[in-house]
Amino acid sequence: MSDATLSSAPQRAHAPAAEPGLVLLVEDDQLTHRLVRKMLHGQEVLVAETIAQAMTLLRQNPMVDLAVVDYLLRGEQGSSFVAELRRHAFCRDLPVIAYTSSQDRDVVLRYADYRVQAFHVKPYRAEVLQRELAAAVASGRRERLFEPMTEVCRRLKIGPDDYAGLLNSGAAMLERDLQVVRRLLLTANSQELQAALHNIAHRLPQMGVKMASPIVRQAQQELAALDYHACTETISVLDAVVGLVRRRAMKLLALGDSLVGTAAPVTKAVRREAAVDSEGVPYHLRAILGQSIGVLGASLGASPVPAALKNGVLTLAASSWAAQPGFEPWLTAMRRLDTIDEATIEVTAGHMAEIGGYDRPMREILIRTEVAKPHELNELKWPAVISKLGVAKAMVFVAAGMVGRGTARGPLDLHGLRLRVVTMILLGYEVGRFLRVTHPHRVAGALIARASGHWILGNAEPVAMALTLARAAHLRDMDAAEQELLGGHLRVAAAQWVKGCGMSALYQDAALGETSDPNSQVTVALVRLAEKLAGAVQAGDQAGVDACRAQLAEAEAWTELAALGVRPPVEPSEAADLLMSLVRSALWMAGEVVNG
């Protein structure tokens, strides 16, 4: 059985299961918040205590199905909120039910003027709320905002795969359009702004995103009135639309429960460049050259260091380097990923609890990727978290935590290496799922093996590591520096270290970066792909990111995987957009794991 092969059947849901209802509760009593959440168990409930908070939540969540509003808020009236709703194109038709403490005729008439769905006297009752939510969903608002997939496919004469690719490309184009719009807003260039908004209004409805047209029309009207503040607020709704489009594409590609998701904030890499010329040194290791030990290495040049290899075989001295304690968490992470099929919720919860200080970063990740709501994580219980994530994804987070939060601290600054490896663990799993391999968790484990050489050398022989990097900067060639100072390529040593620690042939091949074993070829190819993606984005070099995306958008970039029977489920250009989005989110998430 191959370590990573194509699944026997596509693991995709072209008709996703019905989503839970999304309710906005505008109520200033916190006890009521808890009661309504219990009454609407199984549905998503957003809570706002003021009109301003409610409008912010609506801009971030334009697909709300129902607003439940109390008449008396702190210093405000619920009817004022409904009036504000009706002013905005994206939520003008939102069903509203209003509550008050007494059936005052004037209040009832005021709400009737705003076309509320229903008016009720307190207390809240579960059966009433559930009935009103069902009526709101049945009103067809979601379909008015977002055309059903089947209708889009019929109209455009395309299949679900093509539609997913269309949405994915559309999200990428919309992101670029919004960047242009924001830049033009700063210059108050109304003519160019109108043209940029026209592009958005023209593109999105073709893909079934009906809500885009009224949002853009309102922004254009505000722009014509020179109300730039209102225009900026209206355009912010389109940020949420990007997320909706991307999530719909991912669901159709069986990535709806993506580990890294697309809701995580996109961050630029923090540059930790060396004070010396660092060309030829991998980006994630350059910080070492700026340390005292790295500067020493630069001054010493090619001074002798303990050889790691002789005639392609580990030297006696180097054979013990992998035995240092700092490498043990990496080995354990690989073993746990390799035996993921045997894991249970209880066992995985125990592994999570063993990772020191992991509560805070995991809470942030779960909230940002919309796995859980903040109120659900007031008291973080690992079994409940793992039930939401699933054991396989939770174990990938276990591996990321073990590598990213290990206690080993030597004289070298290996922060960049930790960040790189955690990014690759998270990304490797998602790349494997995206390309429908049977064991995506083994791709994540293989990427740990791939980075093990630098980690072992940096902890066991920091001076040798610093000298090698300094020599690489001088030669502008990492491979040549390793050959000259270490007696051979570090990846050759890494494969032997991994083998000596009892790891499988798959992980040995991954550490080496090449294989002739048919059972390992797919995984090793995916390791190289994930490594390329992570390297481009972590360096924070936009030109490098653009070049990587352009390369992946060409069919030739997928030739090796295609020969192994692995093909992206969408066109190469669409796959490139999706992968670049995933790697940015993975990098942010890795930062939380390592630094949180």
Image (cartoon, helix red, strand yellow):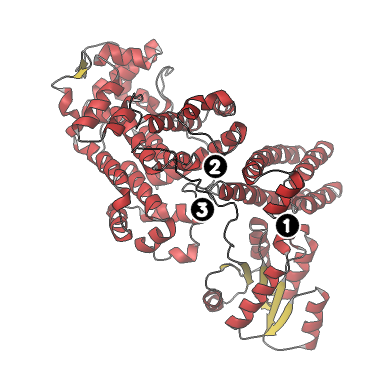
Front label number (1 vs 3):
1
Q: Which mark is residue 368?
A: 3
- Residue extending farthest to the left is 316
- Amino acid bearing label 1: Leu
Q: Which mark is residue 145?
A: 1
How far apart are labels 2 and 3 at the CA level?
11 Å
The earlier-in-sequence mark between 2 and 3 is: 2
In the image, residue 106 sits, relative to residue 231, either above or below, namely below
Answer whether labels 2 and 3 touch (C-beta < 8 Å): no
Circle 1 Cα neighbour tier, 10 Å, few/some/many (<14 / 14–19 / ≥20): many
In the image, residue 207 sits, relative to residue 489, either above or below, namely below
Q: Which residue is mark 2?
A: 266
The percent position of residue 121, horizontal first and vertical second, equals 68, 86
The residue at the point 48 percent across, 60 percent down is 372
- At numbered mark 1, what does the secondary structure look like: helix, strand or loop? helix
Q: Is residue 246 visible?
A: yes
The residue at the point 65 percent across, 52 percent down is 240
Horizontal side, residue 69 vs residue 256: left or right: right
- Pick the quarter of the image with the N terminus: top left
Horizontal side, residue 564 vs residue 112: left or right: left
Front label number (1 vs 2):
1
- Residue extending farthest to the front is 8
Answer whether labels 1 and 2 touch (C-beta < 8 Å): no
The percent position of residue 325, horizontal first and vertical second, equals 19, 38
Q: Nearest the camera: 20 or 181? A: 20
Q: Nearest the camera: 65 or 368? A: 65
- Amino acid bearing label 3: Arg
In the image, residue 525 sits, relative to residue 237, either above or below, namely above
